[in-house]
Image (cartoon, grey):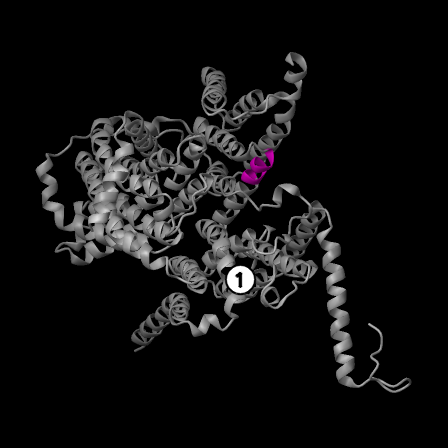
Amino acid sequence: MSKPDSCPPGAAIPPLLLTNLLLEGSVWFLRQFATYVSTMNVGVVFLVLVVFLLLIGFLLRRSARLVPYTGQILVLASILFMAALFTLLTHSFPIAKGKMAAATDAGSIVKLWSALLVPIAILTMIAILKGKEDPDEPFGSLARVGAVVASVVISLLLFNFIGYYISSALFILAVMLLLQERNKVLLAAIPLGWVVFTYLMFARLLYVPLPVGSLFRGMFG
Amino acid sequence: MGDIFHNLYQGMLPLLGVTPMIFIIVGVISGIMGGAIPGISPSMAVALLLPFTFSMEPTMAIILLMGCYIGANYGGSITAVSINTPGTPSAAVTAFDGYPMAKSGRAGEAMGISLYASVFGGIIGTLILIFFSVPLAKVALKFWPSEYFALCVLGLTTVATLGGTHWQKALVSVLFGLMLNTIGFDPILGVSRFTFQITNMFDGFSLIPVLIGLFALGEVFSNIENYDPKEQKFEKISYQWPPVKYYWKLRGSMLRSSVLGTIVGIFPGAGGTIASFLAYDMEKRMSKHPEQFGKGAPEGVVAAEAANSASVGGAMVPLLTLGIPGSSTAAVLIGALMIHDLQPGPELFVKAPEVVYGMFVSMFIANAFMLFIGLWGSKLWVRVTDLRKSILYPLIFTFSIVGSYAVNNSLFDVGVCIAFGVVGWLFKRYGYPAAPIVLGLVLGRIAEMNFRQAVMVSGYRVFYTRPLTLILLIISVAAVALPIVQKRVITKRREQEAQP
């Protein structure tokens, strides 16, 4: 980053050298920034994505023409965000040495896919703007989907504590109730039947060690 | 030619025991039942069965999954004919004429046609697979990395072309899959890419949890969103089977649709759905009574089912010869082969001929069993629809969870499965197809390895100096450009014709 030797002291820096300096500076900055991002927590990156999507969603609300396509555009924006992030992070990769390795490095293919994604995303947006795509479907019961996702996540978190068998039985019961199953015999028989089936099939026949849970390990050793 | 028969004989020997036969029967039955349940596609049925094969011999695992694949492709037609609810996407075409036949009291006729056409199509597809894949694999062994890369590009672009009017979204999905595939250690220099220091991601995403998530959970999330507690079951039907000689009248349609279905199946990403649509369209154009199509024409059911089943054999051609899946179910089978340390591609014929030829023979046996199982269990299959959705959906969830956990005994994989379930649901919801993601994931690694090897050896000029590479790349560009240009020309012509 120091001034080149070819430039005498006190003289103005030639434009070509200045351009080179700026270019090198930008590359240096990009590498530093990419390295910093690559060490970030994935949760923070996800949060940035959410903020980015909220911003896009907010902007879309101003266009009556694009509002019916909000979901489709947000999916596209998420993929573009991922491509931009990955392309940025390629600048944090170690520079390959040697003539053969320099021809293609770990980031080559990432840049190629990202470069292809840009024109295709533009074409998708054109199709949306021209009304060639169907508008987003109206939402069904998002609350039910959310409740099922929450049940899965809770069931997973309980795996290590109460073990797979009880946690999966509770999960089946919860989802059956969410789907408004009211037959008490079925509500009892299906989770129980599933536990017996998985134990015989996976634990006994296929030797898949499903988590028993710290609670039972503590109780029974 | 003699080699093929000798190898087929060798491939048949390990299948002569009781255990392999049981595996094939279990595969076919689970496939038929899975296919008959609306919401379970063949790829989903095979993916759900996959965890059971982890501890099996590779040949046994593959014959079980092939039996399931073949059975599921037929199973989808059962509910398509009986209750106008295609069990699989490819059976949607079967419903066009099958359901009107059932409504007019010809349910048995439609079900019988569907079964016989499926078996016939499956056998024709397998025959073409055997005689086409062996010579193609010999040629493929001489390919350079640049040609493999160009082939991968061709496979990826074909998907986009067959995405129909939403080809842009299919391409977005493919590139999403390709980008996902770059996560983990780079295959040549070992650089850690986009892992954010999460050790579970160093090897990238395991294919099976992603597949189960995208296909099984994505579909279930979608069904749960539109769930109506009042629509728990479907109405029942009764029927009678026609005599065997009745099917002889339909031999021409069966043969034509089977050959077309196999050819379509060979194109990566095409699969049974497109094969069914194309065969249906062909039969309608060739029929003396095209007006009867859609109102209960037996040829319509024949076309859809024969092409759909024949596409299975077709889809296996690129899988075995080039390592490129011809359908989303074939992509799941690639995962199954990889789990057993078998790399799909031409070398499979050299390294594990017993698996390849065992698979060929098992496809014949599975089709034969399907005929008997279909005839014997026809009334039972329809009862699959008696299963309440409030039981089915939680069971699919738990199956998916235990299946994705069993791959590496890892809770991280279960999390991946659920995350991709949400991705699959959102993609489905907003019209982005999920199958190209899988194709991107599967082909991504092969494409990257060959791209970089080609560049390291000969530089970027290899892509325009090697004739075969250049031709394949030109075909790839044409595969995307031609349908778009064609569509524009037709639209302009129509506009001109509409003007006075």
At label 1, the amino acid type is Arg
Identify the residue position indicated by label 1 in the image: B452
Quadrant of the frame with the N terminus of chain A: bottom right
Residue depicted at 32% across the width and 48% down the height: B272
Bounds of the magenta segment: B411-418
Q: Is residue A143 visible?
A: no
A164 sits left or right of B355 in the view: right
Residue depicted at 37% across the width and 52% down the height: B346
Q: Relative to B426, is B490 above or below?
A: below
Quadrant of the frame with the C terminus of chain A: top right
What SS does tag 1 mark? Answer: helix
Q: Position of residue B166 (x, y in %)?
A: 43, 58
View extreme (right): residue:
A10
Q: Position of residue B3 (x, y in %)?
A: 23, 48
Q: Position of residue A80 (x, y in %)?
A: 59, 59
Residue depicted at 24% across the width and 27% down the height: B377
Q: Main secondary structure of the magenta part?
A: helix
Q: Position of residue A36 (x, y in %)?
A: 75, 55
- Quadrant in the picture for residue A95: bottom right
